[in-house]
Structures are given as structure tokens and as C-alpha cells.
Amino acid sequence: MKKDQIQPIQRQSFRDEVYQTLKKWIITLELHPGERLSDKELAEKFGISRTPVREALKRLEDEGLVASLPGSSTYVAPLHVTEAKHAFTVVAVLHALATRLACPVLKETDLQALEASNNALQLAIEQGDVIQAIEADTHFHKVFLDAAGNPEIVLALERSIPKIQRLEISQFNTLKGLNSVEQHNHIMAACRNGECEKAARLVEENWLSLGELLTQSTEPR
């Protein structure tokens, strides 16, 4: 058989698709903290074998979104405010670093993208749409991540961000006084003025203030 006749194996895509789907359901709380996860039942729902499901669950467990007990009992990891508090510290520093790297090379199109994302964030908060709010905030900070051009920062963030997003969704009703939109305005102003160190400091404060707001309440059960 010639090499060009070999068809690509699809199991990898199965595993990734299951992983991304389960991760989304866990972050958005469609799968509740503590909810049992059966690889057999999930495999039946996805219409695939149990192997890609098990691989996806193992990956999610490594990231702290899934937990297991001796005897093969697997479940959605509980929400831990302490873990989220630690995550906010790491995320704040990493996003500040990305802003410091990105600020000197931002283009006008990047600044326009920041403004558009911030407008979308304000609208989502006004409408009480937590998913759209998180997506808009993600797009805002992604402008800096993309411009920074350092994939290691992105990889380091991937482990911590889901823990933060789960907590945001679970406590969205407590965020009515959230001032991220105004903080973003100050960040954009600093970038336009070429005040890159100030912009990085404001980004770090933006994340830390959100973390303080979210972790003030009692840890969810």
C-alpha cells in the first residue's frame, strides 16, 4: 500500500471533541459539581467507544476539573474557592506579562478589537448573560495574548482559566457591581498613550479585583 493511500485515523479527533465538549459542560455548570460521570453512559451518548471518553476524562482530571475515587467512581470536581484564589494570582501575572509584551506592538485594529470586546462585555453584563460576558472578556484579553506572540503564556493559562470561569458562572448574580468595563477603558487608554507598564499593572489589578470579589463569599458546596 502506498503511503498516500493511508487514511487519517479519527480516534484523536474523537478524544479531542469529547474533551472539549465535557470541558464546556463542566465550565458552564451543565454538569454540576459532584455529578457522577460514567464513561459507559457518556460513550453511549456520544456514539463512540469508551476509550476516547476515558482519555478525555483523564485529561480533565489532570486539569482539576474531574476527580475520581478508588473503585473507578468519577465525578465533576467540586468548586473550591481557595483553588480559584490561587488561580487568580497566577492568571493576573500571566495576563500582565502578555500585556507588557503586546502593548508596544499593538496596531489600530487591535485597539478597535479591544473596544469592541469591551462594548460586548458591557452589553452582556447589562443583559445578565454570564456566558456572553465571559466570552467578551476572554476576547478582550485574547487581543493581548495574540499580539504578545508567546504560546507558553497561553499554555500556562489553559489550566487555571476554567477554574476561574466556573466560579464566575456560579456566582454571576453577585457581580452586579463589577467594574471590569471601566477598568478595561483605563487599560485601553494606557495602551493608546504608550504607557505599557501602566497597562500591564492595570491588567493585573483587573484580574486580582475580580478574584477578590468572587472569593469573598463562602465556598460553594
Image (cartoon, rainbow, N blue to C red):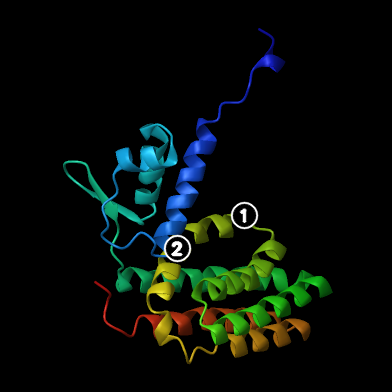
Quarter of the rendering containing residue 168: bottom left
- x and y, in percent, of residue 3 in the image: 68, 14
Q: Residue furthest right?
A: 108
Residue beneath the point at 55% across and 76% down: 133
Which residue corresponds to mark 2? 162
Q: Nearer the viewer, mark 1 or mark 2?
A: 2
Residue nearest the observer in this picture, 148 or 124: 124
The residue lying furthest to the left in this view is 71
Pick the residue in front: 40 or 203. Answer: 40
Decide: few, some or many residues near mark 2? Use Cα within 10 Å; few <14, some 14-19, many ≥20: many
Work out which quarter of the rendered image holds the C terminus and state it.
bottom left
User: Which amino acid, mark 1?
Assistant: Pro
- Between the C-alphas of marks 1 and 2, the distance is 18 Å
Q: How many marks?
A: 2
Is the residue 144 above or below the residue 20 in the image?
below
Residue at point 39% right, 42% down? 45
Hey, what amino acid is under mark 2? Pro
Pick whichever of labels 1 and 2 is earlier in the sequence.
1
Question: Which residue does the numbered mark 1 point to in the structure image?
Answer: 151
Residue 184 location (% of width, % of height):
63, 84
Q: Nearer the viewer, residue 61 or 126?
A: 126
- Identify the element where label 1 is drawn: helix
Residue at x 51% of width, y 61% of height? 157
Q: Residue 59 bears which disc, if any?
A: none
Quadrant placement of the N terminus: top right
Task: For residue 65, say whether it is visible.
Answer: yes
Left or right: residue 75 versus residue 49 is left
Q: Is residue 144 above or below residue 177?
A: above
- Asked which secondary structure carries label 2, the reply is helix
Q: Is residue 94 above or below residue 20?
A: below
Q: Position of residue 81 (x, y in %)?
A: 32, 73
State if disc 2 and disc 1 touch (CB < 8 Å). no
